[in-house]
Image (spheres, rainbow, N blue to C red):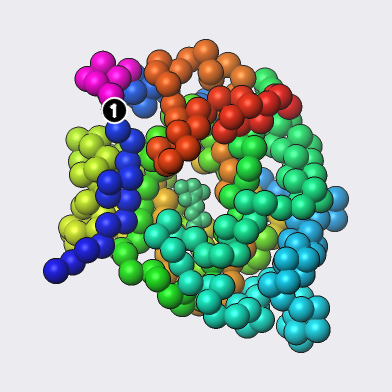
Amino acid sequence: MENKRGHMGKTVIFESKDDHDLFLKDYNSPSLTKKIFSNWMYQGKYNTLNIKFKENIINELLKKDFITENKFSNYNFELEKLHLCLKSELKNLDESEQNEISISFYETSHIIKKSYVEFIKKVVSPLFSENIYYQIVPTFRFHFPNQKGYDWEDRYHSDIMLGHPPFEFNLWIPFTKVYSTNSMRLMPYKESIKLMEFCNNDFELFAKKTQYDENFRNRLKQESSPLDMNYGDFIIFDPRCLHCTQYNDTKDTRVSMDIRIIMESAFRNYSREYKTTGRKKMPFLPGHYFSEKAV
Ligand SMILES: O=C(O)CCC(=O)C(=O)O
Ligand SMILES: [Fe+2]
């Protein structure tokens, strides 16, 4: 018997038909990414001499005793080779597709937080004509080659189907070279909408087909591609776009950060309450999921 679950049982639950209708109103509202960037995504660059994510991440790994300077120096301090310096149990994945190192980065040094906020203020915020709020605790991912525990089909999803408001923007920022299976696969807006419509915008059905319908899975793969990016690049994409982590069968570690931002005006446009679907049920509001102040 198969018991791959992927995102099954983890998609947003609507309290009533009204709640669902209100959600659909937001979900079907025009894409803000298209409005601002004239496209469903925007690719940008920033100066890594000014915002030193990589150096700060390496210092944090040393501080947390995940690696020693002596060992990492054998690999020229290249994050791509991080997996060769780590104890193997640190690399195993849990059910939420995370390992111990990624989880430990939910708590990071002041220095990493400072570069994060600087990145938002100096690089991201100027792209918008109004102030933005940012995800207060950024998600860092350390994605190692051949991680144990990856026993599901690639979990294509949009963050919206996991409870996020349709007015967010997704940002994805790699700190290593990313390519092929160590990267995230991303599907353009039109195809994402189409494949979700094929499931009648039923997120549980989508999650099930993603695990159990081979034809559907082939379509997901055909319509998406892995991001090919370098340190210093970042991408913003519409939150309806489907994306997934893949089983990393390259020889390189991927380190990345993914965050969500939202414009000040969006909160007035929420037709319903948006909350995280996990245990915490955190509202997608300033001072909760998002920063207290707009920048
Ligand atoms: O980086 C990944 O592999 C997945 C990231 C993701 O799901 C997101 O950015 O929302
Ligand atoms: Fe996601």
**Amino acid tagged 1:** Phe
- Residue 125 picture quarter: top right
Q: Is residue 237 left or right of residue 127?
A: left
Q: Who's the residue at 24% across and 43% down the image?
A: 204
Q: Position of residue 153 (x, y in %)?
A: 31, 63
- Residue 292 picture quarter: top right
Query: Is 27 a magenta residue?
Result: no
Q: Is residue 185 left or right of residue 222?
A: right
Q: Position of residue 20 (x, y in %)?
A: 27, 23
Q: In the image shown, does 138 or 191 lie closer to the viewer?
A: 138
Q: Is residue 223 visible?
A: no
Q: Who's the residue at 26% across and 62% down the image?
A: 4
Q: Who's the residue at 85% across and 55% down the image?
A: 49
Classified by dominant secondary structure, the portion drawn in magenta counts as helix
Q: Is residue 21 left or right of residue 283?
A: left
Relative to residue 9, is residue 255 depicted above or below?
below
Q: Who's the residue at 56% across and 65% down the image?
A: 100
Query: Which residue position holds label 1?
Result: 14
**Most extreme residue toward the right, as rendered?**
50
Per the rendered image, the range of residues in magenta is 14-22
Circle 1 SS class: loop
**Most extreme residue toward the top, as rendered?**
268
The N terminus appears in which quarter of the rendering? bottom left
Q: Position of residue 226 (x, y in %)?
A: 47, 60
Q: Is residue 112 visible?
A: yes
